[in-house]
Amino acid sequence: MIFNGFAYFCTMKEFLIAVVVLTFIGCAPTRFVEPLEKDQWAVGGSVGGPMVGFGGVAIPAPLSSIEAGYGLDSNLTVFTALHTTSFLFGTGHMDFGATYRPLKQKGYWPSVSLTGTAQLAYSPSAKAFNFWPAIDANAYWNYGKRRNYFYIGCNNTFVLSPDVDFDRPNAQRVLFSPQFGHVFKATENRYQLFAEVKLLGPYIAGEDAFVPYTGILGNQGVTGIYIGFRKTLNKKK
């Protein structure tokens, strides 16, 4: 079961670290669904993660990250992010990538964006390194004077390791996760607030997971919930 995920980064007793590890396999929100304007910078952060059950109550894991992006042109944004919770637990984890918009919205037909991401993680204590590439595809609709938007899409994270936890064979080389969210723009788009729900591997049964993950589909997959903010900076003059 891939949601047990790479347990050599932790021990059986270190429950919180096991939760943190799940972010390594596609559990961050989508970066920059809508590209920035040309020569525009943005910085921000997010918190949230897979839903975990505690005494009958489900809460999202408090996984956090900070990010920065730059608009190479109005259809192409490059970005990087540092996963700060993982860093606090002694594991370096970051991602970098780019978002490209091949289609712009026309009436009710949405804009379409494609995001390629590479995630890198290294645990000094375990002397373990991992790399996970991912591809997101999203359709989004701008509306109103502020051009807020909502989106729906999917994430595909590629798990290259032949084994998962405790040297069990990896049966899931691609983790497919539908997602939807909303971005609210404020103060002439100088600030953005966003929320996202991601259905992590909804086709995978989770009854044997080490961490008590939960979600809206019962024991099928895991539901991730994320909120965040972003501040856009002045463009170059």
Image (cartoon, grey):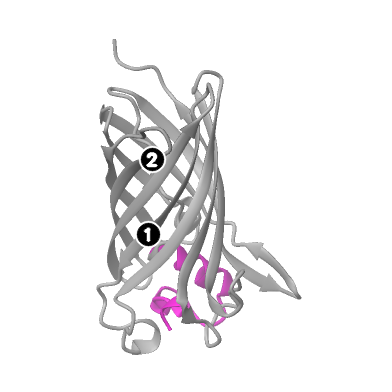
> Residue 56: x and y, percent?
75, 75
Q: Is disc 1 surrounded by few (<14), some (14 to 19) or many (20+) residues within 10 Å?
A: many
Q: Amino acid at mark 1?
A: Asn
> Residue 142: x and y, percent?
46, 33
Is 93 placed above or below 170 here? Answer: above
Locate the C terminus by quadrant.
top left
> Residue 110: x and y, percent?
39, 40
Residue that appears at 37% across and 59% down: 155
Q: Is disc 2 surrounded by few (<14), some (14 to 19) or many (20+) residues within 10 Å?
A: few
Residue that appears at 27% across and 47% down: 97
- Judge from the rendering whether residue 148 lies leftward or rightward of residue 38; answer left or right: right
Which range is magenta?
Answer: 1-24
Secondary structure of the residue carrying tag 1 is strand
- Closer to the observer: label 1 or label 2? 2
- Judge from the rendering whether residue 59 lies leftward or rightward of residue 35; answer left or right: right
Q: Which residue is mark 1?
A: 155
Q: Amino acid at mark 2?
A: Trp
Question: Which secondary structure type mostly characterizes the magenta part of the structure?
Answer: helix
Residue that appears at 42% across and 42% down: 140
| Relative depth, front residue between 222 and 164 | 222
Cα separation, mark 1 vs mark 2, equals: 21 Å
| Relative depth, front residue between 87 and 169 | 169
| Relative depth, front residue between 16 and 203 | 203
How many marks the image carries: the answer is 2
Task: Verify whether residue 18 appears in magenta.
Answer: yes
Q: Which residue is mark 2?
A: 109
Locate the N terminus by quadrant.
bottom left
Task: Verify whether residue 76 appears in magenta.
Answer: no
Residue that appears at 31% across and 31% down: 70
Mark found first going from the N terminus, 1 or 2: 2
Whether residue 200 appears in this view of the structure is: yes
- Judge from the rendering whether residue 219 lies leftward or rightward of residue 35; answer left or right: right
